[in-house]
Image (spheres, rainbow, N blue to C red):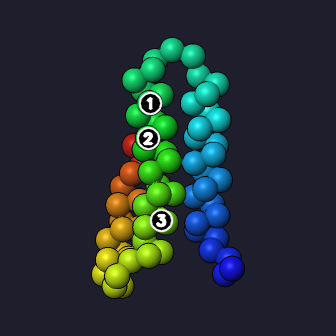
Amino acid sequence: MKENKLREMSLEFSVGIIQLCESVKGHASLVNQLERSGTSVAANIHEANHAHSRADFIAKLQIALSDSPERML
């Protein structure tokens, strides 16, 4: 299988987000939002790898970028 650094990094990021959320006590709604947005990045990158066209690929990566919790800071 071909190595895909972006996919690998996004998966590591998602796992880190899940571990962080498990360690936080209280503020359930904030933790829930962080978990959903943090894990959606990897899901959107996975979808981009199966895009129908170059434009579709770029659009899906832009969605992943906009979902990134780092952009919320």
At a point 65% along the width and 53% down the height, the residue shown is 12
Which amino acid type is shown beneath numbered disc 1? Asn
Q: Earlier in the sequence, mark 3 or mark 2?
A: 2
Q: Are marks 3 and 1 in contact (CB under 8 Å)?
A: no
Q: Is residue 23 above or below residue 55?
A: above
Q: How far from the left and from the top, in percent, is residue 28?
A: 45, 20
Rate crowding at label 3 as few (under 14), some (14 to 19) or many (20 or more) other CA atoms within 10 Å.
many
Residue extending furthest toward the bottom: 53
Rate crowding at label 2 as few (under 14), some (14 to 19) or many (20 or more) other CA atoms within 10 Å.
some
Whole-angstrom CA distance, mark 3 to mark 1, is 21 Å
Please name whichever residue, 65 or 12, is drawn nearer the observer in this view of the structure: 12
Whole-angstrom CA distance, mark 1 to mark 2, is 6 Å
Which amino acid type is shown beneath numbered disc 2? Arg
Please name whichever residue, 1 or 57, is drawn nearer the observer in this view of the structure: 1
> Is 56 on the left-hand or right-hand side of 4?
left
- What number is the disc on residue 36? 2
Q: Are marks 1 and 2 in contact (CB under 8 Å)?
A: yes
Is there any visible trace of residue 70 in the rendered image? no
Q: Which residue is mark 3?
A: 45
- What number is the disc on residue 32? 1
